[in-house]
Each structure stands twice: as structure tokens, then as C-alpha cells.
Amino acid sequence: MLAIVGGALTLRAGYRLEPVELPTGLRGGLSGVAFGADGTLGVTTRWGEVWTRNAAGEWRRFGSGLNEPMGLVIESPRSVVVAHRPELIRLVDTNGDGSAERYEVVATGWGESANYHEFFFGLKRDAAGNFLGALSLTSMADKKEPSPGSRRGTYDPTEVAAPTGHHSDLPWRGWAVQISPTGVVQPVASGFRQPAGLGLSPEGDWFVTDNQGDFKAACGLLHVQEGDFHGHASSLKWEKGFAVKTATLESLWPRVKSPAVVFPHGVMGVSAGEPVWDTTAGRFGPFTGQVLVADFGQIVVRASLERVGGVWQGACFPFLGRNDRAPHVTGARLLGGTLHAAFAPDGSLYLAATAGWGAGEDGLQRVVWDGTITPEIQEVNLVEGGFRVRFTQPMERGRLAETGRYQLSRFRYYYQPTYGSPRVDESPVAVQTVTVAPDGRSVVLKPARLEAGFVYELTVPELRTQSGEGILNPLVYYTVNRLVDGSGPPAGVVRLRRADEAAPGSANANPLDKVTAEPVLRAAGEGIYRLYCSACHQPDGRGIPGGAANLREDKTRLAKSDDVLLATLASGIEAKGMPAFGGILSTGQRRAVLAYVRATFGDPQPGTREPAPE
Amino acid sequence: MPTPTCVRIGRLRMALTCAAWGMAGMVVVMPESMRGLARAAGVAEAGKARADARRSGTPGAEEGVKSRVRVERLYLEGAGPSALVVGLADGVGVVVEPAAGAVRWVWTGGFPDLGPVRPGAGKLIDAVKLPGRVRFHDESEAPVRCGDSRKPPVVVFDGYDLQTDAVEVRYRFDGKPVTDRLRALPGGVGLERRLETGDDRSTWFEIREGGEVRALVRDERGRLVLDRVWGEENR
């Protein structure tokens, strides 16, 4: 919107994205960002470096030579603690020249090999001075068994419950760890796959984001407590007394702790990173207390949390990235590859991005709120029998009260060892009543069915503010782990596949598997593309620079035969960061999305072709 | 973009001045403007040199910056997934396996290419390959032992300190603090390696290839001597 500020006509939109200039010599690959208490900014890079920027804006290379660090805590301008692959390590500038001379190992003791997927993610420090980090699993994409000279720790390749694409073959991989100030490592919770984001709420609750993959239906924000099992079976082999030989999906499922907030794949990101709490007391907009989550797939997700029945759960909304071209974001485009975030002392949000794993871009950006309160769904809470939906502005009451203006549906996922999960038991849910608050800022929706163990999707594209504006991001997902009375299934929003249900990806797993009519496939494919593909390949098919393929303009992509493209959809391309959809989409669904892609971005006459030269 | 005329003239003046200086060996008093140009050019050249040096990976090559050894934590087969790959002066390099407190390789010939192990080279990580000439290689389980040559010590890696011409790697051997100081001998003719064991004055041993056991001697400062010298003629 245009506004007169200081006598000048100014474009105000809500949020402004600005690039942060990086010093010559900083080679990109930003893998951590943090602020010290005195305002010192620090970043780590995947090239092993630590750079700091003082209050005067002067950058220095503080440290180097680390092994792919993934997070830092700035203790002072002369002391930085870093999570890198083998250790938690403290870098100290002993002589005050601006760079570290001393590298002190604070803690180590987990298994490590040269596998590209083995990160030590971090880093947060709690009020007691304990450091919090998490260890990712080993990828089986590198099919060689690590030689004794390339690994550290007891090697145990035993599969747990089922074969998977990622393993915990070395001690404590797949665990979240707490490290005392004296360096004692305590593995706290298991079942993680790629726990790329560590977060600490203002109240001291520990949260981790984990990524879609084997045993992981989608990314999500997970509440971590001692003894938790968060789903991936492989890491359980390191649990004292765990019976590996008798473990089954059925025996493990009741132990699974559901994410507090599920980020449905694609539309709410593809690879979640660091969650940060808005503690700016209103300097970053109307979302104080909520969580912003950086995502590698060119999106920042917003989440609101609440405790229901003693369990954390809540809602997620798109915040930046999906529609940041207009109208509520000005300035630069959000970079793909954003995995880390930190609020600065001035209330702006810093986002650190890295190119890598076949996608992403390098850079540091800053998000500033320009004071405009844009029309958004501010918050969703669970109430007795329904949801309270609160808006950032008073809404036009006529539409607000109409039940037909609210599109509600629900779904859940399989707990399965294959990559991801389709949405299952998906169905629309009628909104029976809408009760509008006197101030027009909120409604209570009572759906026909409200059941714990489901993700509820709400879209409200037809609502208007009192000034006639539409909601900028009219989509929200609420993860119902518990009802208000505390009832809910043991594993939240994941269930076991019944014996009479076809395995996802197999023949006849979906009604589309029997469909051959192209128009029907194309129409169905549009919805599948929007849900699963557009996060990376974008709604216009142009992909992400340095990442997901440009299906529209790179003609070589769709020149390949249907067989080749369908196989790619099923198996993914791990080197390029493309998931394997074989466990998520049925054969018919994959044919449908291919039909849509060809009709929309490529040759309008789909069919078998000669393979294009590689 | 065409070079502005003023800059072209400035550069010509500077070139002539430098040529004259070089030919005559005289002290040339330059006008203030030319001194400023020379300063600016010098600063720019120094900055470029530092950037080039950093990109080259050559240890100690950053002009105008305090010279230091270089340590990178890298995967090197036989030295673990996060070995210390150390670049010392005069092209001397050392690979330390921190979990064993062991020097695994000593080589001369520059710092390795980090491409295979750092981001940008694809997703899978390859081992670092050492350039130049290997001067020493050891694969024994626990080559340095304290008190009892038959008993491998429990080694804890505590970190390292960077100095102008040396790196000090810190350990605990069976709970005893040890500092392992690594420095290139002048001219790159060898590696000076001295272990500082504090108050501990017990006999320490080196287990060499083939199982040979050698009691380590101490230098004038009481440090254990594990130098490797290959001599000038072998450089």
C-alpha cells in the first residue's frame, strides 16, 4: 500500500527483504547465523569458516578449517562455540587480533564417518548453559561401507524393523544430544532423520525440525524431551536394552511422538531448517511469540504453538517465499537454500542460505517489518469442539459468518519405512457453525467432525477485511495431536497401513491407477503438481536457480521418454535433492502429474519418446 | 567500461616513476597526489594478494596478514573422517589423526586440493589426496606410548592452537596433558615434533613400523623429541 511517511509517498507492503553484503573472501555456503549479546553477528560456512561482524559493520574471518559446521553460539566477540561434524568446539581469540588462535574441543563422542549426510546440527544453549544439538543419519546413497580408516565409533549396520535409505550405523546418529558446560554428552531423544533445525522457546522448551524421508511423512516441528522416540527406527539400536531383532513397525508405532506441527510437504516447504521465536515485542509485526522456520525450498513458514492436553501442537502458515513478489513483501526475492535464521537485536530477521545438495543459493538476507499490518490469519487455536481462527485485522462480518466461506478438510499419514507418505484418509469436512467475535477479529468454527490424529487444512480465499482486502496467505494447517479433553491416539497424525490397503506407489493404490483418459489425468495432475511439485519446480514450472529443474524453459527436461520421467518420479534424484515419490504417489498419480506437466510446460502430445541424449 | 582519463594518466605517471626508480636506483620524491595513488594501488594490490592467497590455500601466504599455519579438518583415509591436515612453512605438511594422537603422514609440496571434500564438488565426499612427496607414513595403532610400551594409551583430543610458525595439538594420554608441537624445520628439510608432557618425566616410547620400540629422548626443555628430518638433498 502507498503511504505518506515523513512527507514522502512510500510503498509499504508489510515486509522488506534486503540482501546483506558479505565480505570478499566469504565463499558462501552459509550454514549458521547467530547474534551475540553485544550485537556481534556471526556466520558459519560449509567451507569450514566462521566470520563475525561487529557493531561498526566490519567483517573478520574469525576461524577456519572446521569440518562443515552447522550452527554457532557467540559467547563474546572473542569466543564462539561451533557445532561441526566431529565435535562441539570453542574458538577463542586469545590475543585480541580478531581471529581465533585456540580451538578447544568442548565435546565429542558420537560416531562419525566421511558420509556426506552425517552432520552435527546445532546450536542452542539453554539457561543452565547446556548446549543442544542433533545428529543426522548416514545416507545409503553412498553405497560403500565406510572403511575402518574413514570412521569413528562402533560400526553396526543392522537394519531395525525394515530396510531404509538412511541408517544409524554409528553411535548416536539420529539422536538429539544435550552437552553440559563441561562437555558431558547426553543423548536425549531418538528417531530423527535429518534434524536440521534446533530451536529453544522463550520458556526453555526444546524443539527440532526434522525432514521428510524414510519413516518421516513430512517435515515438521518436533518437541523434544528426554526419552522421546520421533519415528526413525534405525537410531533405536543405540538405546540401552532395545531388542533390535524383534522390532517391527507395529511394536514401534505406539512409541512414535507426533510432530507438534506438521509442515505438509511441498506447500509448507521441503526441507525444514532452523526455527526461531519472535521475541521482538512487536517490532517484527503482529506475530510475537510465534515461530519462523527457514526452509531450503525457498519458503519461510510461520507456526503458532499451544499446549493441549499436555502436548504441544499448533498451526502453520506460509510466511515468505510463496507469494513474495506482491503484495506484502518488497525488495529482494527470498533465496532458495535458506536453512538458518536468527533475530537481530533491532528486530529484523536474518536468513542464511547455502547452495548444496544439488539445489539452493548462497547468501545472507535480512527481513524487516515496515510497520504495515497486512491481512493474515494471525493464529489458530483448538477449542472445545472446534477451532478459533484469529485474523490480524477486523473482517467484513457478512462473509465471515457464512459457513460456506471456509474450506476445511483433513488427512493423516502412514508410518512407513519408505520415503515420505501420501496423505491418507483425506476428506472434506463441513463447517457446521461459525460464531463471529464482537470485534470481528476472530471466529470459532465448529466442524462436523473433529478428531485427534489428523491434520486439518483450512483455506479462506473468499474472506475480506473491512476495507475489502483478501487474506494474503489464506491457508493454514493445524496438527491435532490431542483434543481439549486430552484424548488422542498414541502416534498422533501417523497410523499404520492396514493389510487390506495397497502400498503407496504400488498398482491399484489409488483410483487414478485405473484411469487412462488424458484429460482426467491432466486435471488430477494439476492438484498433485500444486501439492508436491510446485514448491521446488514453482507454479510456473521455472524451478529454482541452481536447484529444481526449469521444466518450462529447459527443453531437454521433458524431451525424455515417459518411462524415464516416471522412473525419475518414483526413484527421485538424491544428488539433486529430488525426493523419491514412489512411496508417496501411486502409479496413476505419477502418470497424472506427468500428463499435467507435459501439457502445461512442454509438448502437448505426451507419449513414448526416444530418450534425449544426456 | 572505459578507464577514466584521470586514472590512465595516474597509472602512466606511476609506471614511469617505478621504471625510473628501478633503473636509476634513486630515491624519487613524488608529489602528494602520486603518493596517494601509489598508496591506493598498494593497498588494492595487498588486498588482492590476500584474497588470492586465501583462494590458493597456501599456508602463510596472506600478505600483510599475520602469517600462521593452516589447519583443515578433512577426511583422509587412514587418519579418520576429521583428520587434522596441517600446512606448515616451506611447503611442509602433516596429517594428524586426533583420536590416536598420531602423526600419520608428513609430506612436502604444498597444501592439498580441497575440492573433493568441500561443498560444491557434488554430494559425496572423497578423501583428500596429498600432493608432492610423502616423507613419512605410519599406520601403527598407537605409535606413542607412555610408561609401558606394550600398552596403547587412552588418548583424548582436546584441540589445537595456531601460532605464527607452529601448531600445538593438545591431548590427554591416559589422563596426562600433552602438547604436541609441530613446526617445519627451516628450509623445509624436516619436521620438528616435540611433545610437552608437563610434570610427567616417565619414559615414553615410539612404536615404529615393524614393531620396533624406541625410547624417546627429551630435549633441553624436557620435551620428547620425535623430529623427522629428510635433509636438504632430498627436498
Image: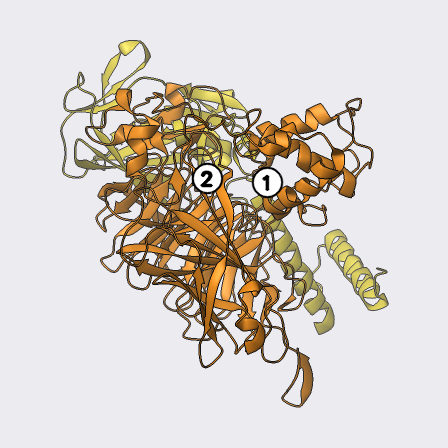
Chain colours: A orange, B yellow
A539 to the left or right of B6:
left
Disc 1, SS: helix
Which one is nearer the viewer's eye here, B48 or A158?
A158
Which one is nearer the viewer's eye here, B167 or A463?
A463
Q: Which chain contains the residue that carries disc 2?
A: A
Spot occupied by residue A569 in the image (x, y as percentages of width and height):
62, 31
- Seen as rendered, the residue at the extreme top is B210
B228 to the left or right of A528:
left
Q: Is residue A415 above or below residue A341?
A: above
Q: On the image, numbered disc 2 is attached to which residue? A: A217
* Quadrant of the snapshot with the C terminus of chain A: top right
Which image quadrant is residue B206 in?
Answer: top left
Q: Is residue B172 above or below residue A204?
A: above
Q: On the image, numbered disc 1 is attached to which residue? A: B56
Spot occupied by residue B63 in the image (x, y as percentages of width and height):
56, 50
Q: Residue at x 71, y 64 (%)?
A: B28
Total labels: the figure holds 2
Any mark on residue A62, and which?
Answer: none
Spot occupied by residue B17 in the image (x, y as percentages of width and height):
77, 60
Q: Tell me the CA gap for discs 1 and 2.
A: 44 Å
* Quadrant of the snapshot with the N terminus of chain A: bottom right
Badge 1 local density, few (<14 within 10 Å), some, or many (20+)? some
Determine contact: label 1, label 2, CB under 8 Å. Answer: no
Which one is nearer the viewer's eye here, A250 or A186?
A250
Amino acid at pointer 1: Ser
A332 to the left or right of B130:
right
Amino acid at pointer 2: Ala
Disc 2, SS: loop
Which image quadrant is residue A275 in?
Answer: bottom left
Q: For residue B227, say whether it is visible.
A: no
Q: Which chain contains the residue that carries disc 1?
A: B
